[in-house]
Amino acid sequence: MTSAAVVHSHDYGCDIGPHVFPMDKFALVRGSLIASGDVDEAEILCPVPASREDLMLVHTPAYLNDLEALRWTPRTAYSELPLTADIVRAYVLATGGTIRAAREAVARGFGINLGGGFHHAFADLASGFCYINDLAVAIRVLQRDGTIGRGAVVDGDLHQGNGTAHLFRDDEAVFTFSIHQENLYPVKERSDHDIGLDNGTGDTEFNRKLEEGLEHVWAHHPDIVLYQAGADPFEDDQLGALKLTLEGLEMRDRLVLEGCAERDIPVVVTLGGGYARRVSDTVRIHARTCQIALRLARDSRSLA
Ligand SMILES: [Zn+2]
């Protein structure tokens, strides 16, 4: 038994054709966590799709109408995925997963969605491999429900969380922090705190800067942290030029997750990107992130 919630559905996977994004990673991470004994299959929570009402806390009706009608318009055209009913359904479901994980995190301390982290989506604009900004929707849902007041997003993905930064740009209640490769997609928006890294940045420098950046997050005193734990700062990633090792990524995860645990801040893990030459490396990185959260949750419960 564990006290961290793990949320996943096999319907997170969808057919996107030949693509650099390994859609099967969600199910593979699930399988890895079950095989390692970190979670029982029966404990995995199945999400319901985010409602239109929930999505409208972040996205515009015109944009949601485009998605529902599967229409290529100036709002959907920047997607780097096909636009099919199956794909839209998967993104709306994974957003429901992040909402569920966030609610569970408030109750239990840790919530893990084996999906999500779609940080490039804007209110009325698809971007990259992202149609719905699940991080922003989850924060807005919990605020609407009166579950939280203040929130923070810690974005450890290779790419800047541009959509998230823009969505919360004028909102003092939500702090956005992104650490990413500077010289890379996307065009940068302004987060509350950005750390843009040079190509070739390795473990030590990344984690030293992350630790400094996290001080700004702690100073905000969030009621919840949404952690975008992209696997793509990895040294063998096909899209990036950061040089983090598996050990360096584990240290990244510990800085974020232990930092939240020490401060009793509920934290939600979402997976985000990951394009390692070998999909097994991406799965291993994501599974390790989840294991750290699961074991921290277990340890903190046994101390309680
Ligand atoms: Zn990424």
Image: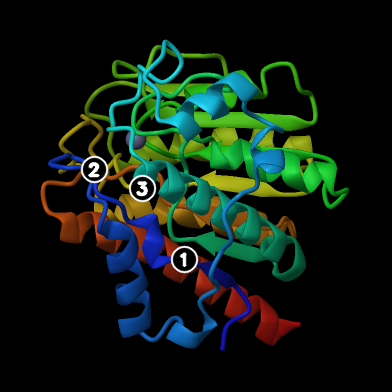
Q: Position of residue 247 (x, y in %)?
A: 30, 56
Residue at the image position 51 percent from the left and 14 percent from the top: 189
Where disc 2 sits, the SS reads: loop
Pair 3/2: label in front: 3
Mark sitting earlier along the chain (1/2) = 1
Q: Are marks 3 and 2 in contact (CB under 8 Å)?
A: no
Q: Is residue 27 visible?
A: yes
Q: Position of residue 166 (x, y in %)?
A: 59, 18
Q: Is residue 285 above or below residue 167?
A: below
Residue furthest to the front: 69
- Residue under label 2, please give it: 16
Q: Nearer the viewer, residue 41 or 60?
A: 60
The kind of residue on which mark 2 rests is Ile
Mark sitting earlier along the chain (3/1) = 1
The kind of residue on which mark 1 rests is His
Mark sitting earlier along the chain (3/2) = 2
Residue at the image position 60 percent from the left and 63 percent from the top: 111
Residue at the image position 58 percent from the left and 82 percent from the top: 2
- Residue under label 1, please give it: 8
Where disc 1 sits, the SS reads: loop
Please rate how many residues cluster around mark 1, counting C-alpha atoms within 10 Å: few if below 14, some from 14 to 19, many from 20.
many
Q: Which quadrant is the N terminus positioned in?
A: bottom right
For label 2, being within 8 Å of ligand 1 is answered no
Q: CA distance from mark 3 to mark 2?
A: 9 Å
